[in-house]
Amino acid sequence: MMASYIFSTVPSATEVTTNNFSHSSIFSKTSTHRFKYTHENQTHRFKVSCNKTSDDKYDTLETSLDKKNVDRRNLLLGLGGTLYGAANLTFLPSAFSVPIAAPNVSDCAIASKGIHNIKDAVRGVACCPPVLTLNSPKNYVFPKETAVRIRPAAQRASDDYIDKYKAAIKAMRDLPDDHPHSFKQQAKIHCAYCNGSYTQKESGKEYEHLTLQIHNSWLFFPFHRWYLYFYERILGKLIDDPTFAIPYWNWDNPTGMIIPDLFEKPIQVRERKENPVFDAYRDARHLPPALVDIDYNGEDRGVSCIDQITINLSAMYKQMISNASDPTSFFGGRYVAGMDHDDKNSHGNPSVGSIEAGCHTAVHRWVADPRMPNNEDMGNFYSAGYDPIFYAHHANVDRMWKIWKELGIRGHREPTDKDWLDASYVFYDENEELVRVYNRDCVDLNKLNYDYETSRIPWARNRPIPRAKNPQMAARSARMGRSFHDVQFPVKLDGIVKVLVKRPYVNRTKEEKEKANEILMLNGICFDSEKFVKFDVYVDDKDDEPETTAADSEFAGSFAQLPHHQSGEKMFMTSAARFGLTELLEDIEAEDDESIMVTLVPRTGSDDITISEIKIELVPIV
C-alpha cells in the first residue's frame, strides 16, 4: 500500500502523518457527465458521441485580442499598497541577462542526454547536422510571397491532400542521409536541440560549458514553431508546391482523438511499411480505434469512450484556461544564458508551461512503443522526429498557441521580455542556406504566412465540476486523530503527499480577481531526468471516494516530463510548475478558506522526486 504524508507550509513547523490511500476504478462502463461553462452566469451542456464523423462544420471561434500597450511597471506600481503590490514583483527580469542563442552547426557534439540505453539506441546519437559552410548563419529574411499555407486537420484531409503529403515525405526520405533536407537530418534537429548536442557558447564564452535545452522553459513554443516552419517549406519545395502545408493532429477535438488513419492505413503489414508516414515504433495498444489520453499516466485507464473524451476535454480546459492565465504559466519560465537545468543552485530554474507538461508530453508518451529500450520513437526527444506523426502532433501544439491568444482573455499574450524576444536558433532553410531566426519574428502568423483550418474547440466550455463541496470538512477530516511531527522541505514524493498551504488572501471580490490570478506554485521540483516522470496535483480532495480525474474540479493538473539527460547514472534536473486556483476555489466553494489541502499523487518515475517549496501567490494580470 502506498504511503501518504500530510505537511503544513507554516515555516515554524510542518505537520506530517501517514494514512492509507485508496485507488479504485474511476467510472462505470457508461456514464453521463455535466460540463460546466461559466459565462454571464450560464451553465451549458456539451454532448459527446463516440461515433466517428467527418461532419465538423462548426462556427468559427470569435476572437477579441487586446492589442493595447500596457506599461507593466506603472500598472504594478499603481497597485502598490494593495494585495497585488511590491511583494509580487519578483518576476521582473534582470537588466543584465543575456538571451539564449543557438551556436553555429559546426559547434555540435554527439547527443548523450536523455537516452537511457545508448548501446541499444535504434536511431543513433550522432545528431549534428551537416556542415555546408563555416560562415556564420545569416539572419533569416522572409521571402516575398502572398499565398497563405493552410494546415488541415488530419482526420478531415482529402484523398488528394493525403497523396500529396505522402509524396512530399517520400521525396524527403529519398534524399541522401547527409543532405540537410533529408528525412534523417530533419529528425536529428530535435535530437540536437533536446539531447545535449549544443551548448550556450554563442551567448558568451563563459557559458560554453552549459547545455542548451529548448524544453522546460519559455523556449518550447517558439523553437518548435520555427522547426515546423522550415520542415513545411522544405516539403513544399520537394514537390514544387509553395502552398503545401503539413497536417495537424486534432487530438483536442472528439473527432480527432485517434491516430489519424493516414499514418497507419492500409492494414496489410507489407503495404504499411511502404507508407512513407508509417512508423514501426508506436504502441500497438493505441492504434485506431483507441482514443488518445490527454492525461496519460503510462497506464491505460480502461474507461468508456465517453469517459475518456470527458477527461480529455476537461484536461484541455485546465491546460488552456485555468492553468494558463499568464505568459509564464502558458509558455514556461524564464530561461537565459547561464541558467542550468541540471544545477539546482544556478541563478534560477525554469518552469514548465501548462501545455508542454500536459497534452504535449502525454501524447508523446501515449504514442511511443514501451517495448523499445528508450521508448522510441515518440517517447524520447532524441528519436521523436523519426515518427512523421511528431510533426502533426506539434502542429496542433502550435495551434494551441494561436488559439490561446485568440480566446480574448486578459493576460493571454506572448512574453515581452527582451531576453525572450531576442532568443535565437539556427536552421537550414528550404534553399539550404544556414539562417538564424528569432522569437520576435515568429509571433505573428501573418508574417510566417501559414494558418490552420478551423476546427471546433469544445473544451473551451468544458470547465470541470466538483466531486464534492464543503471542502473544509475534507481538510479537517484529513488531519483529525493523527499524530504529527516536524519535517522540513524538500519533500520527497515516494508516496502520496498532502500539504496544507496558507493562502495570501480570502474572499476576493470580482474586481480583485480581475487584477490578479491566484496561483499554486511548486518550486524546486528535482527529478531523475532519465525517466518519464509524472505526478498529479489535487486541491481539497477526499480520500474515500472514487479516484479524481481531470474531469473533476479538485484536479489541479499534472507535472510530467519525457527523458532529458544522459545515461549511465541518475542525473537530476530541476523545474517548477504552476496551477491556477481562482476558478478551482470558486467551483469547490473554498474561497473563504484560509488554507487549502494540496495532494500530490505520484504516477510514474516519481520515487526520486523532491519538491523544495509549495506556495500560493497572487500574480497580477497585465
Image (cartoon, rainbow, N blue to C red):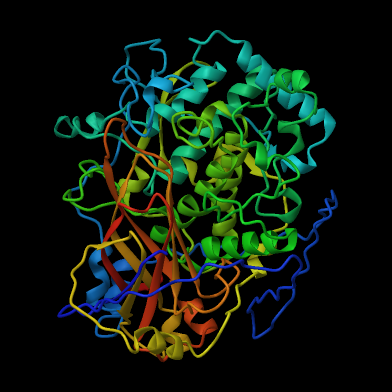
**Picture quadrant where residue 390 is located:** top right
Residue at 37%, 47% in the rendered image:
216
**Picture quadrant where residue 2 is located:** bottom left
Residue 298: x percent and y percent? 52, 49
Q: How many numbered marks are there?
A: 0
- Asked if residue 127 can be seen in this view, the reply is no
Residue 332: x percent and y percent? 39, 53
**Picture quadrant where residue 328 is located:** bottom left
Q: Report the front residue among 589 and 417.
A: 589
Q: Is residue 542 above or below residue 334?
A: below
Residue located farthest toward the front when viewing the structure as drawn: 1
Q: Is residue 538 above or below residue 380?
A: below
Residue 233: x percent and y percent? 59, 26
Q: Quadrant of the C terminus?
A: bottom left
Q: Report the front residue among 313 and 483.
A: 483
- Asked if residue 138 can be seen in this view, the reply is yes
Relative side of 595 to 490, left or right: right
Q: Quadrant of the N terminus?
A: bottom left
Q: Report the front residue among 542 and 393.
A: 542
Residue at 56%, 51% in the rendered image:
299
Residue 58: x percent and y percent? 79, 58
Residue located farthest toward the top when viewing the structure as drawn: 176
Relative side of 274 to 620, left or right: right
